[in-house]
Image (spheres, rainbow, N blue to C red):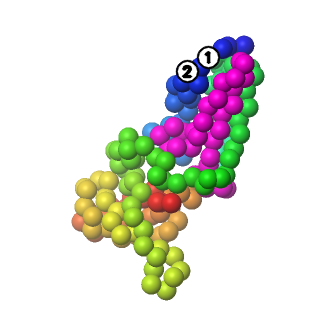
């Protein structure tokens, strides 16, 4: 059994990446909510970006592997849904990493006049940095992304949905 502080365990878990967007760690995303070390036991608290996020099983497995590889045998991983995850929990560094990876960061959204759905008001193309973009589909390559296209450069790109 390894004894460590909350900060030391948090540093170890900073290596755990989102399997759908491998340039982001779970800390970057705000999925890693808390680490608590008490009497040699580690409690890791995580919140999924979406309640049905398929990446969460792999994230839990990666957290467990990281802890075990660093000598922690007494640990638990708790998934909490309240408060619900929000893009406000993403670090500014995460938004830069997304852009550099070719995914637009969360943009402000406005309800559609009919009250059904939403439209993105200011998505910036991560490729040419134009704000002349439009949504092609509310559903992108994963549940947390929408498919956009840039009117300036003509390239499609993913937008990480704002929540």
User: Is 14 on the left or on the right of 152, as rendered?
Assistant: right
Question: Residue at image x 47%, y 40%?
Answer: 28
User: Is 37 on the left or on the right of 110, as rendered?
Assistant: right
User: In the figure, residue 151 lies in which quadrant?
Assistant: bottom left
**Percent coordinates x, y for residue 132 in the rendering:** 27, 68
Residues at circles 2 and 1 in contact by the CB criterion of under 8 Å = yes
Question: Residue at image x 38%, y 40%?
Answer: 93
Q: Which disc, if any, is residue 8?
A: 2
Q: Is residue 100 in sight in this rendering?
A: yes
Q: Is residue 124 above or below residue 54?
A: below
User: In the figure, residue 112 lies in which quadrant?
Assistant: bottom left
Which residue carries the number 1 mark? 4
Is residue 131 shown in magenta? no
**Percent coordinates x, y for residue 139 in the rendering:** 52, 65
**In 3D space, how far apart are the residues under numbered discs 2 and 1 (Cα atoms)?**
6 Å
Q: Is residue 144 above or below residue 8?
A: below
User: Is 143 on the left or on the right of 51, as rendered?
Assistant: left
The magenta span reads 26-52
Is residue 31 shown in magenta? yes
């Amino acid at each position: 059994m390894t004894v460590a502080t909350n900060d030391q365990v948090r540093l170890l878990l900073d290596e755990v990446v989102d399997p759908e967007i491998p340039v982001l760690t779970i800390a970057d995303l705000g999925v890693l909510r808390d680490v608590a070390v008490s009497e040699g036991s580690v409690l890791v608290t995580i919140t999924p970006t979406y309640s049905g996020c398929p990446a969460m099983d792999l994230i839990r497995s990666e957290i467990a592997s990281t802890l075990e590889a660093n000598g922690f045998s007494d640990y638990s991983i708790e998934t909490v849904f309240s408060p619900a995850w929000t893009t406000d929990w993403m670090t500014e560094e995460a938004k830069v990493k997304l852009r550099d990876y070719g995914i637009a960061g969360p943009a402000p959204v406005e309800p559609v006049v009919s009250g059904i759905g939403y439209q993105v008001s200011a998505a910036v193309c991560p490729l040419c940095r134009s704000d002349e973009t439009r949504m092609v589909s509310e559903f992108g390559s994963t549940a947390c992304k929408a498919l956009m296209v840039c009117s300036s450069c003509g390239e499609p790109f993913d937008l990480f949905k704002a929540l």
